[in-house]
Image (tube, rainbow, N blue to C red):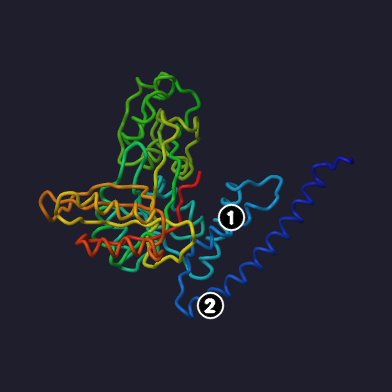
Amino acid sequence: MLVQNIDDLRVSIDRVDSEILRLIDKRMSYVKQIGELKNINGSTIYRPEREKAIISRLSNLELNHLNKKAIEAIYFEIFSVARNLEKPQVVAFLGPFGTYTHQAAKARFGAISSYTPLSTIEAVFTELINGEAKYGVVPIENNTEGGVGATFDCLGVYNDKIKIVAEIYLDIHHCFVSRYENLKDINKIYSHPQGYNQCLKFLEDHALTEAEFIPTKSTALAAKMASSKPNSAAICSKIAADLYGVPTMFEKIEDNLANRTRFFILSNFKNAKSGHDKTSILARTEHKPGALVELLEMFRNEGINLTKLESRPIKKKEFTQHFYLDFEGHIDDESVKTVLENAKKQGHDIQWLGSYINGDER
C-alpha cells in the first residue's frame, strides 16, 4: 500500500471538510423549514426526545473512529446551531461564567447560544417567568454533597409556570491551574472552600498545603484571581481556566473521581413521551399515620420504579414537610395517571414538576 505524504492527506482533509460543511448547510435548510412550520403551529423548538433519537441512531452506525461520546460532542453543537437558526436561544444559569453550571449549560446548548449568568437560583426562575430567557439551567443534587435546597424550594413555588424539561449529569473534575510552571513559585491558592476541600490529597501529595488558601465565592472567580495575582494558583473547572486563559497544570485532582452533579434544564413546555422518561413531583401527604407508606405502595402496585425520595420543609407552615419524588415514566403513561389520580383521591396533594428523558446513562 502506497503511503501518502502529509500534504496529500491535508488536501484530502480539506476536501472532506468542504463536503461536510455543504451537507451541514443542507441540513440547516431542512431545519429552517421545520422552524417555519413550528412557528405556524406553535410547536416547541427544543425537542430533547428527538435529539436523543438522533444520537441513538447515529451511535448504532458502524464507524471506525467515533464513539457515542464523540458523536454527542459533535451533534449537540449542530443541534445548538439548528435551534438558533429556528429562533435565537437565550439560556439563563446560576453564574457566574466559568462555573460547573455554565459548563453543563454549554454542553447542551453549545457555543452559539446566548448565556445569562445570574447570582441566585430563584433569579433563574424569575428570568424564565419574565420571558427574558427561554431556558434555565440549575443544579439539583451532587452525589457527595446531596440536594440543592434552593432548587427544590423554587420548583415548589414556581411549578405552575416552569417545568423541568431535561436533566444533565456532569462529572465534576477540578483542575489545578497557574501561570507559574514551578510549584515552588506558588504561595497562594484561590478556590471555593468546597472545591479546595475536595482536593486535599492532591495538595498534600504535592506539598501545597503550606501555600495560603484564599477562599472565593466561586471556582470561576478563583481562576480570574489566579490569572492576575503573582505567585498564585487556582482550583477550578476546565471551563473557568479556559475562560481566563490560565494554563492547566493538573487535571482531575479531586479526591473522589466519581464526583457527579445533576442539573435541570427548565422551560415552559411539556415534553412528548420518549419511552425512556423520568417524572418529578412534589407530594404533600395526608396528615395521618402511614400516609407516606400508602403513597409509596401506590407506585409499587403499578410497577413504577422510584429513583429518588427526599423530604423538604414547607417554609410557610411550621414543622410540615412535602416530599420530592423522581420515578421512571411519563406523566401521560396510564400507570402514572392511575397512581396520581388515586393519590389525590386519598387526600395527597400532588404537584407535577416535569417529565423528561432519563439522562442517567453512563
Instruction: Check disc 1 and report its element: helix, strand or loop.
Output: helix
Instruction: Check disc 2 and report its element: helix, strand or loop.
Output: helix
Amino acid type shown at disc 1:
Ser
Q: Quadrant of residue 254?
A: top left
Identify the residue position indicated by label 1 in the image.
56
Q: Residue at x 47, y 40 (%)?
A: 238
Q: Choose mark 1 or mark 2, whichever is in front.
A: 1
The residue nearer to you, when weighing 273 against 44, is: 273
Instruction: Judge from the rendering whether residue 210 lies leftward or rightward of residue 85; answer left or right.
Output: left
Q: CA distance from mark 1 to mark 2?
A: 26 Å
The residue nearer to you, when weighing 307 against 109, is: 307
At which x and y percent is residue 1? 89, 40
In the picture as drawn, the residue positioned furthest to the left comes out as 318
At which x and y percent is residue 110? 51, 56
Q: Residue at x 77, y 56 (%)?
A: 15
Amino acid type shown at disc 2:
Glu
Q: Residue at x 42, y 53 (%)?
A: 167
The residue nearer to you, when weighing 300 against 250, is: 300
In the picture as drawn, the residue positioned furthest to the front comes out as 301
Identify the residue position indicated by label 2 in the image.
36
